[in-house]
């Protein structure tokens, strides 16, 4: 039984009523699109099956280190974060899992947390460890790094934390650990690069040893920030080095915001897939750096090109789109309602995925084989310029979700009700 049942929830009847109102216009748009597509049923099914994990830290207003402007009604604890993702999942049926960050999230009663998540149809995606901040009561500081640290005792503390996170994840039914390290240096000469790498590798090895057989470890890279001269897992090459040396349960995780400007992320994705070392994604978008803006809000064509490589690469390796890679959002904002923003992010991901599924593979192969550059571009852009939103909406409808989740969120005044329940001053824990 649930210990606390939130007041705000969305039920089947509200969704059915909403869908009924939109059915006529949706039906027309879908039928028109379906007429031109040979494999529409398969695509709708693939969209239906696709799930994107929601990070627990995206449910509050974050975004900048200069200030925070809460909109009110933010989740005050893990239970309320799960309830928020429950709302999101009820609206779109594509957000069926939550990714926790330890110790921002502190599960006290694992069984109760699992029951609560199951109540909303949610499971636990990757667990995230945190050795980039000092926590209260922690004996040693991470000021000069964690796994790269010159002091073995600091390194041990980071190892112990990661192993503890694995144990917590096992209690919750998670199957993966994401390690993102802020380790690096801000000034030339500060660090011996090779020693920093070796120390980090040694620590990761110890954590890897503690990983259950059916778990994966994701090594996330990031070019800069908080360190601005070097980062010890700074790019996909370094991440791939660690993952290769660690073993078959270790993979590279691509966060879209973690590259130097203009990096060709789709090419990185293609090669990691080829090597069987792509583990998963953190979706977001950026103009400058690790901006963590809404996925698809700045470079939708890049997002489509990434999905194009994913679909092509996964299909050629016989991989299952729904479970062989970890799909997660990693974003945090200052301006938008966090739940509305997540509705937009998930929609953008599904739109890019649908467009990639539309690509005429045979025509593309033919164009490539004959060096027909113009035709290759035509093939890709034909898919990208197709308005696939009716496909995504149809998949939602068939899953029992809302045809227009954002409109329903607003019609039901979800945020207003959350504010009533939690107050205007409620601020989520996290960054
Ligand atoms: C670091 O910028 C990062 O992308 C990592 O995934 C962290 O876990 C997350 O952001 C924290 O906000
Ligand atoms: Mn990330
Ligand atoms: Mn990031």
Image: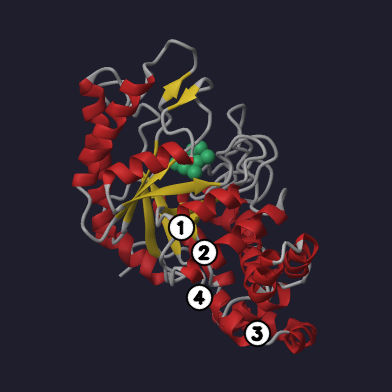
What's the residue at 55%, 81% (across, down)?
45
The label number, if any, that marks residue 49 in the structure image: 4
The disc, 1 or 3, on the residue closer to the chain's N-terminal end is: 3
Q: For this view, does 368 lie left or right of residue 195?
A: right
The disc, 4 or 3, on the residue closer to the chain's N-terminal end is: 3
CA–CA distance in space, label 1 to label 3 = 28 Å
Badge 4 density bin: few <14, some 14–19, many ≥20, Cα 10 Å: some
Question: Which secondary structure lies at badge 2?
Answer: helix
Badge 3 density bin: few <14, some 14–19, many ≥20, Cα 10 Å: some
What's the residue at 50%, 26% (across, down)?
226
Residue 103 visible somewhere in the drawing: no
Q: Are marks 2 and 1 in contact (CB under 8 Å)?
A: yes
User: Mark 1 highlights which residue?
Assistant: 274
Q: Quadrant of the N terminus?
A: bottom left
User: Mark 2 highlights which residue?
Assistant: 313
CA–CA distance in space, label 4 to label 1 = 24 Å
């Amino acid at each position: 039984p649930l210990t606390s049942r939130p007041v705000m929830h969305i039920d089947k009847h509200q969704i059915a009523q909403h869908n009924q109102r939109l059915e006529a216009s949706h039906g027309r748009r879908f039928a028109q699109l379906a007429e031109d597509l040979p494999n529409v049923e398969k695509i709708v099914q693939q969209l239906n099956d696709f799930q994107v994990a929601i990070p627990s830290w995206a449910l509050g207003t974050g975004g900048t280190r200069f200030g925070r402007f809460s909109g009110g009604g933010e989740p005050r604890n893990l239970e309320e974060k799960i309830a928020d993702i429950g709302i999101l999942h009820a609206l779109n049926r594509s957000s069926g899992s939550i990714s926790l960050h330890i110790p921002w999230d502190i599960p006290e009663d694992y069984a109760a947390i699992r029951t609560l998540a199951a109540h909303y149809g949610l499971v636990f995606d990757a667990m995230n460890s945190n050795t980039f901040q000092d926590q209260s009561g922690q004996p040693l500081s991470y000021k000069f790094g964690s796994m790269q640290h010159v002091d073995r005792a600091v390194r041990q503390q980071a190892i112990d934390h990661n192993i503890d996170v694995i144990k917590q994840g096992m209690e919750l039914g998670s199957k993966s650990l994401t390690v993102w390290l802020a380790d690096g240096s801000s000034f030339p000469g500060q660090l011996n690069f090779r020693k920093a790498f070796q120390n980090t590798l040694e620590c990761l090895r110890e954590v890897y040893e503690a990983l259950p057989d059916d778990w994966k470890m994701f090594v996330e890279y990031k070019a800069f920030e908080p360190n601005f001269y070097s980062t010890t897992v700074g790019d996909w090459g370094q991440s791939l080095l660690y993952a290769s040396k660690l073993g078959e349960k270790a993979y590279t995780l691509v966060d879209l915001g973690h590259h130097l400007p203009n990096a060709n992320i789709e090419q990185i994705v293609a090669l990691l897939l080829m090597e069987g070392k792509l583990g998963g994604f953190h979706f977001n978008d950026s103009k400058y750096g690790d901006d963590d803006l809404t996925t698809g809000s700045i470079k939708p064509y890049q997002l489509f090109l990434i999905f194009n490589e994913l679909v092509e690469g996964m299909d050629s390796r016989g991989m299952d789109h729904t479970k062989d890679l970890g799909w997660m959002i990693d974003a945090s904002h200052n301006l938008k309602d966090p739940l509305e923003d997540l509705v937009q992010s998930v929609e953008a991901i599904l739109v890019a995925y649908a467009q990639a599924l539309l690509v005429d593979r045979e025509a593309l192969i033919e164009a490539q084989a004959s060096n027909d550059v113009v035709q290759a571009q035509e093939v890709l852009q034909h898919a990208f310029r197709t308005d696939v939103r009716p496909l995504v909406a149809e998949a939602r409808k068939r899953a029992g979700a809302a045809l227009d989740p954002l409109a329903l969120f607003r019609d039901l005044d979800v945020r207003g009700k959350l504010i009533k329940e939690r107050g205007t001053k409620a601020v989520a824990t996290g960054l």
